[in-house]
Amino acid sequence: MPELPEVEALKGFLTEQVTGRTVEHVWPAAISVLKTYDPPPAALEGQVAGPVARYGKFLAIPAGGLYLVTHLARAGWLRWQDTLPAAPPRPGKSPLALRVALVGGGGFDLTEAGTQKRLAVYVVHDPAEVPGIARLGPDPFAEDFGEAEFTALLAGERRQIKGVLRDQSVIAGIGNAYSDEVLWAAKMSPFKIASRLEADEAARLYQAMESTLTEAVERSRGLAAGRLKAEKKSGLHVHGRAGEPCPACGDTIREVSFADSALQYCPTCQTGGKPLADRRLSRLLK
């Protein structure tokens, strides 16, 4: 799933490509992708696009007083094309969900692999009309969100820190991959209860979050949309690397599997050398 760093990079890429250009066509290829119907997607046609904004993992493209908002979900992606077919796409079994064509040529496709269709597109007057945006917690890069605010958020959370970091209503933009990376950088167990963190632990976690996300954004900055997936994978230290040696200590990276996801961690760096039981509700083995 694209997370804050990739969506931030897509925001920059799209801003360069679409700002000041007129929308010629908005063609849905899968009805399931549309989560709003009034205004219709065609209301964007003939409007001039402005700089793209990011809200957590959402992208919002302004055009003539409206916004085209999308969330790429787990298997969605944005594919830019300098030349698009002149004919509208035909609905079918293709991964294509929606196409936006610009006057003068070029545009982008929103695609989604697999059978679980969760990619979402909204046409709204204000991004806050999108329920997922309205529920978002603070952005890690917001000017008014610092270590003190982060620590205060954790104080009331009696959940495992892994789940807290992934909860978009608590902190916007972090998903499964970067929560693993942040916890590894902070040398913290994913099963540690958030409200039980000592002040120095919360400070260490905040610094790890800021540095991990900032470094990921910097690696992705300026890359074309088609290169972002490979860049994300190459920059991960533990996520998706179960069975490989930890780049910090050499211990074998372990995995805990859940119904629809998995986390990866280093026992030596994060759990005092003790493995975590591979059960949905497990706690650290003693």
Image (tube, rainbow, N blue to C red):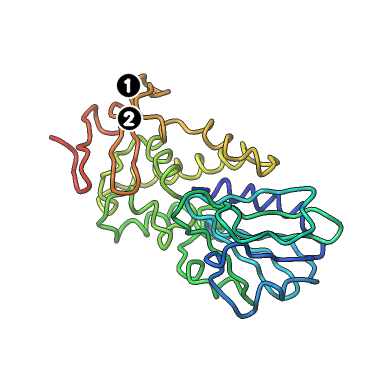
Residue situated in front as seen by the camera: 188 or 112: 112
Toward the top, the furthest residue is 250
Out of 189 and 27, give the one closest to the viewer: 27
Which label sits on residue 251?
Answer: 1
Residue depicted at 55% across the width and 53% down the height: 141
From what the image shows, is residue 191 above or below residue 184? Answer: below
Q: Position of residue 121 (x, y in %)?
A: 58, 65
Q: Residue furthest right?
A: 104
Real-space CA distance between mark 2 and mark 1, rounded to the nearest whole angstrom: 7 Å
| Quarter occupied by residue 18 | bottom right
In terms of sequence position, does the residue under pointer 2 or pointer 1 come before the other?
1
- The quarter holding residue 216 reads top right
Pointer 2 local density, CA inside 10 Å: few below 14, some 14–19, many at least 20: many
Q: Tell me the quadrant of the picture where the C terminus can be found.
A: top left
Residue type, numbered disc 2: Cys
The residue wearing badge 2 is 266
Q: Is residue 23 above or below residue 210?
A: below
At 58% across and 46% down in the image, what residue appears?
6
Q: Could you say which disc has been placed on residue 261 in the image? A: none
The image position of residue 62, as x and y in percent, is: 70, 67
Q: Amino acid at mark 1?
A: Asp
**Residue at 24% over, 29% down:** 272
Q: Are marks 2 and 1 in contact (CB under 8 Å)?
A: yes
Q: Tag 1: Cα neighbours inside 10 Å, few (<14), some, or many (≥20)?
A: some
Q: Secondary structure at mark 1?
A: loop
Is 45 or 18 nearer to us in this picture?
45
Q: Residue at x 32, y 21 (%)?
A: 251
Task: Tell me the element at label 2.
Answer: loop
Relative image position of residue 97 (x, y in whole percent): 59, 58
Pinpoint residue 148: horizontal percent, then vertical percent: 42, 55
In this rendering, position of residue 253 left or right of residue 17? left
